[in-house]
């Protein structure tokens, strides 16, 4: 009887100790140490174009200068370009011309610039264009909604402003190549 109790307690003890120590034996790592790339190991690839942090980007910008580096969150899809084109014709064409080439009757009088030239197409970032629409320029009026209570008929929503940017950068210079219904 006594022998059986001793045997039982020994096997219980072994049962507790052995599994814990097994993990510390060298071969317990064998499966892990293999020539595969583990997390955080090797080359970090740059983030794909248009990636944004999972926490999002701050869209609170106080002026055009701060908008310069904003990432355009709206893909320049055919729908977005089309929407931007409609808005451009309503809000921008009076001064910049339907073609964007500063060929409206008032373009010359107020000094509206050609939006199809290199200065706008290559030098200005999409963020800057969005900032120009939002905050205005020197002569050009602002189209950003300052607050819901002061919103006027001239105000464009955040997305509408990006649609216009997409049109300016992707549709304006290739107007004849894009077929609109
Ligand atoms: C009332 C006339 C007027 C309207 C409407 C207007 N603009 Fe302008 N815009 C101007 C004038 C004038 C300039 C050049 C002087 C200045 O920068 O203010 C200009 C300049 C710009 C510039 C160049 C900014 C820079 O950094 O030099 C961009 C881009 C632009 N406009 C886009 C637009 C877009 C997009 C719209 C429509 C949402 C629009 N404009 C509506 C008059 C206008």
Image (tube, helix red, strand yellow):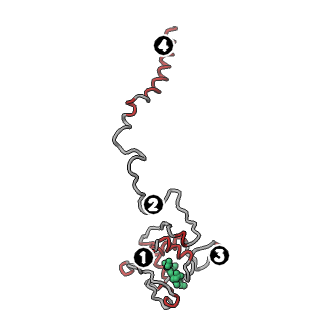
Residue at 48% x, 66% y: name it: 71
Left or right, 105 with reference to 181 = right
- Distance from Cα at disc 3 to Cα at disc 1: 32 Å
- Distance from Cα at disc 4 to Cα at disc 2: 64 Å
Residue at 50% x, 67% y: name it: 70
Q: Position of residue 122 (x, y in %)?
A: 42, 74
Q: Position of residue 170 (x, y in %)?
A: 41, 74
Q: In the rendered image, is residue 101 in sight?
A: yes
For marks 4 and 2, give the one nearer the viewer.
2
**Label 4 CA crowd tier, 10 Å (few <14, some 14–19, many 20+):** few
Q: Nearer the viewer, residue 128 or 86?
A: 128
Q: Which residue carries the number 1 mark?
A: 121
- Distance from Cα at disc 3 to Cα at disc 4: 86 Å
Q: Which residue carries the number 3 mark?
A: 150
Circle number at residue 7: 4
For marks 3 and 1, give the one nearer the viewer.
1
Say which label, 3 or 2, has the lower sequence index: 2
Locate residue 176: give its quadrant: bottom left
Say which label, 4 or 1, has the lower sequence index: 4
- Distance from Cα at disc 4 to Cα at disc 1: 86 Å
- Say what secondary structure mark 2 lies in: loop
For marks 3 and 2, give the one nearer the viewer.
2
């Amino acid at each position: 009887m006594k022998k059986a109790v001793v045997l039982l307690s020994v096997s219980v003890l072994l049962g507790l100790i052995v599994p814990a120590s097994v993990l510390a034996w060298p071969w317990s790592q064998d499966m892990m140490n293999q020539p595969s790339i583990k997390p955080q190991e090797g080359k970090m690839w740059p983030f794909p174009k248009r990636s944004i942090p999972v926490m999002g980007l701050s869209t609170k910008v106080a002026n055009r200068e701060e908008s310069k580096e904003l990432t355009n969150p709206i893909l320049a899809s055919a729908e977005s370009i089309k929407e931007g084109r409609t808005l451009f014709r309503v809000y921008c064409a009076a001064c910049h011309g339907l073609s964007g080439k500063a060929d409206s009757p008032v373009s010359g009088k107020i000094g509206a610039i050609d939006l199809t030239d290199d200065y706008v197409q290559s030098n200005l970032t999409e963020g800057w264009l969005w900032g120009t629409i939002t905050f205005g320029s020197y002569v050009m009026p602002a189209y950003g909604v300052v607050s819901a209570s002061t919103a006027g008929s001239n105000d464009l929503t955040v997305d509408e402003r990006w649609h216009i940017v997409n049109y300016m950068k992707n549709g304006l210079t290739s107007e004849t190549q894009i077929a609109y219904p």
